[in-house]
Image (tube, rainbow, N blue to C red):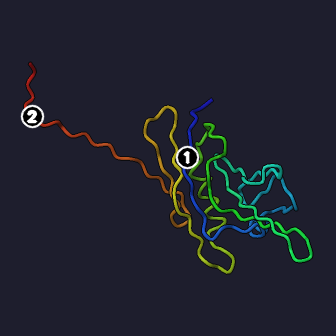
Amino acid sequence: MGTLSRITGRITINPGITWHEFLDAASEPRPYPSQITTGDTRYYWDPSTPDTIITGAIALEVDTRRALTDDGTETVRRTITAIIPIPGGERVKAYDIDSDIARVAREFCSASGDDTRYFTGYLECTAEDDWKPRRWYVRSGLAVPASPEVTFTEPEGPAVGF
């Protein structure tokens, strides 16, 4: 069955990934796809829950803004704004969380017009059989881990028993 992990945190994407950028990166774009493949990454998007796209052990947060034009037509603008844990707070198999994060960062590292895209924040992953959390940051298109350091200091005073 394997070890399950709890993932928390948020990696904000700035500027966000426009819906057109996301669909343009897909090998088989469809107007309302439930599965979108870009390179070696498979994304799952359900139009009935349009605020997240699932990929591996992580999700992409989708900000949807609706507006009416002067002639009464509704326009919908979607932007991917963050890498987040899969909604619901369930424990997941996060064996490949580093490659899940890195694939998103690599595929969408530059914004429209070749502007730099920034990934700030971290996702924290804690396995149920390990007390030490591990944080994942994005640096230069890679998912970089950081683990806490534990140090013990000897208490002061004489080492005598009573």
Judging by the rendered image, the residue that carries numbered circle 2 is 157
Disc 1 and disc 2 in contact, CB within 8 angstroms: no
In the picture provided, is 84 more to the left or to the right than 144?
A: right
Precedes in sequence: disc 1 or disc 2:
1
- The residue at the point 67 percent across, 47 percent down is 56
In the picture provided, is 147 more to the left or to the right than 114?
A: left
- The residue at the point 76 percent across, 66 percent down is 19
Residue type at mark 1?
Thr
- The residue at the point 79 percent across, 56 percent down is 36
The crowding category of the residue bearing disc 1, from other C-alpha atoms within 10 Å (few below 14, some 14 to 19, many at least 20), is some
Q: Position of residue 139 (x, y in %)?
A: 50, 64
Residue 24 position by quadrant: bottom right
Q: Position of residue 38 (x, y in %)?
A: 74, 60
Q: Position of residue 97 (x, y in %)?
A: 58, 48
Q: Is residue 11 above or below residue 149?
A: below
Q: Give the SS element for disc 1.
A: strand
Q: Give the SS element for disc 2.
A: loop
Cα distance between the residues tagged 1 and 2: 41 Å
Q: Is residue 2 above or below residue 64?
A: above
Q: Is residue 156 above or below residue 34?
A: above
**Numbered label attached to residue 8:** 1
Residue type at mark 2?
Gly
**Nearest to the observer: residue 122 or residue 3:** 122
In what quadrant of the picture does the N terminus appear?
A: top right
Instruction: Report the number of discs.
Output: 2
